[in-house]
């Protein structure tokens, strides 16, 4: 196989069978793969665990700001991936002291939420959502639960009402699906947060936005807007898919079938295993070489874009013996939260885990006989290059009585 021929990431097979796609890329190209994104825009996809760990650990050589990219002249107008790669004044694009300043602000603002109150909020949101479908004896856990729990919790923590939060959630889905409406969706989210910031500057509240406004980081409105979208994107999309993927695993894998009644012991195990096998953080853009450098046998030129293949790296056969089964995921060396200076902020990671564990525990406590209502191989994955999650997760269960409005 010609190891110089780029792989097209918009090949439909990439979404239908990413694990097989990664195996073939690894066999034909090694740990660093030349790829073409939509519009045949070139990049490198890092799928080797050791190579990706090295990239994430060296923020000087593999820098974050998109202004370093050497292929901007090849980006088409209205490119659907533009919202993911455009230079924005946010924590994702910043470097050095600026990045550390923003990370401190985000950690402090998220940590400002009382842990007990957070668990109570997640439980109340979960119970209210379950009340909405428990009497039917059937539901789509992805659309009616897994996606909505983190969305509603995060929007409330930010200070958004449920109606606005639902609209923002829909736009965030469009953004991550990287379709033709991604740019318009991003514009609408900017508008929502512009209005929210104006409101909170005039009348602060007990929410993340107000705490970030008053933080010593000294945010401008534009900077704060960009960071709020980054926080919501990281917290909602990946956490929702984390919950959905863990529920899919628990409902389809016989190792978990007998433990659904003991969900409190099995939820954490399923959540950790998913971070290895079906990571919601499938791929991320990205890093930009600050100089010419060799990586995985490839010559990366200054300004080249590297896409971070978290899911592929977690499945690197060089990381573990070939005969290990899915149950090997007891350790936390996966890269699903990234690694290094630009990894998921510690406070945000704790928030995501609290939402995910609580959501699964409440659901399986309330509906202990829940079962998948379609064959496991009919569960389809959403067509996103960035996140991995199911399109739908239809289930059935014994109808239950709602607990009432909370």
Image (cartoon, helix red, strand yellow):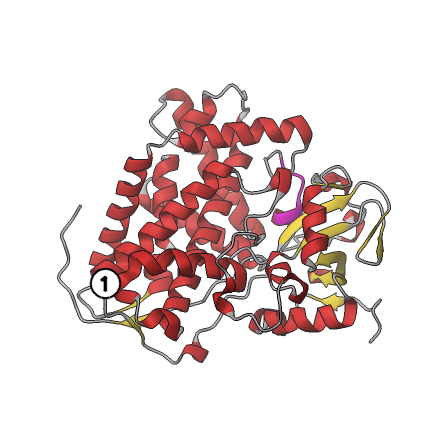
Secondary structure category for the residue under label 1: helix
Residue displayed at 43% across by 53% down: 170
- Residue 291 location (% of width, % of height): 84, 42
Whole-percent x, y for residue 394 in the image: 34, 71
What residue is shown with label 1?
Answer: 133
Q: Quadrant of the C terminus?
A: top left
Which quadrant of the structure image shows residue 219? top right
* Residue occupying image coordinates x 27% and y 62%: 262
Does the stretch in magenta take in 332?
A: no
**Stretch of the chain drawn in magenta:** 84-88
- Main SS class of the magenta portion in the image: loop
Any part of residue 67 in sight: yes
Side of 67 relative to 91 (left or right) = right
Question: Based on the displayed image, in which of its 4 quarters is residue 47 positioned?
Answer: bottom right
Tell me which residue sits at (57%, 52%) in the image. 333
Specify the quadrant of the image occupied by residue 6: bottom right
* Quadrant location of the N terminus in the rendered image: bottom right
Residue 11 shows in this picture = no
Q: Residue at x 35, y 52 (%)?
A: 357
Q: Position of residue 4 (x, y in %)?
A: 84, 67
Q: Nearer the viewer, residue 149 or 228?
A: 149
From the viewer's perspective, tell me whether residue 17 is left or right of residue 201.
right
Between 54 and 65, which is closer to the camera in this rendering?
54
Q: Residue 232: x, y in percent? A: 47, 43
Q: Is residue 85 magenta?
A: yes
Q: Count the marks: how many?
A: 1
Of residues 209 and 200, the one drawn nearer to the viewer in this rendering: 209
């Amino acid at each position: 196989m010609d190891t110089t021929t780029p792989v097209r990431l918009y090949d439909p097979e990439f979404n239908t069978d990413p694990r097989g796609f990664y195996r073939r890329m690894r066999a034909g190209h090694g740990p660093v793969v030349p790829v073409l994104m939509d519009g045949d825009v070139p990049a490198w996809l890092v799928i080797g665990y050791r190579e990706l760990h090295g990239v994430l650990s060296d923020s000087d050589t593999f820098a974050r700001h998109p202004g370093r990219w050497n292929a901007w002249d090849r980006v088409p107008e209205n490119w659907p991936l533009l919202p993911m790669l455009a230079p924005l004044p946010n924590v994702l694009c910043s470097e050095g002291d600026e990045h550390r300043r923003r990370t401190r602000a985000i950690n402090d603002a998220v940590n400002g939420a009382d842990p007990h109150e957070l668990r109570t909020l997640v439980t109340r949101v979960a119970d209210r959502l379950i009340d909405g479908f428990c009497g039917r004896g059937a539901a789509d856990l992805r659309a009616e639960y897994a996606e909505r729990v983190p969305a509603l919790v995060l929007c409330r923590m930010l200070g958004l009402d449920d109606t606005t939060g639902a609209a923002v959630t829909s736009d965030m889905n469009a953004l991550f699906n990287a379709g033709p409406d991604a740019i318009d969706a991003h514009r609408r989210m900017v508008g929502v947060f512009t209005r929210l910031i104006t409101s909170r500057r005039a009348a602060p509240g007990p929410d993340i936005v107000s705490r970030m406004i008053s933080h010593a980081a000294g945010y401008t409105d534009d900077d704060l807007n960009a960071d709020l979208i980054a926080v919501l994107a990281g917290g909602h999309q990946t956490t929702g898919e984390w919950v959905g993927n863990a529920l899919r695993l628990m409902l389809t894998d016989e190792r978990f079938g007998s433990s659904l009644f003991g969900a409190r012991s099995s939820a954490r195990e399923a959540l950790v295993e998913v971070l290895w096998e079906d990571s919601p953080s499938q791929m991320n853009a990205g890093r930009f070489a600050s100089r010419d450098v060799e990586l995985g046998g490839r010559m990366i030129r200054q300004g080249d874009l590297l896409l971070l293949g978290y899911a592929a790296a977690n499945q690197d056969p060089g990381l573990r013996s070939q005969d290990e089964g899915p149950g090997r995921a007891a350790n936390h060396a996966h890269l699903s939260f990234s690694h290094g200076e630009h990894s998921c902020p510690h406070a945000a990671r704790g928030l995501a885990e609290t939402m995910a564990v609580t959501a699964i525990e409440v659901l399986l406590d309330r509906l202990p006989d829940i079962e998948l209502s379609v064959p496991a191989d009919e569960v389809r994955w959403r067509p996103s290059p960035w996140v991995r999650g199911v399109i739908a997760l239809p289930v059935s269960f014994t109808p239950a009585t709602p607990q009432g409005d909370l």
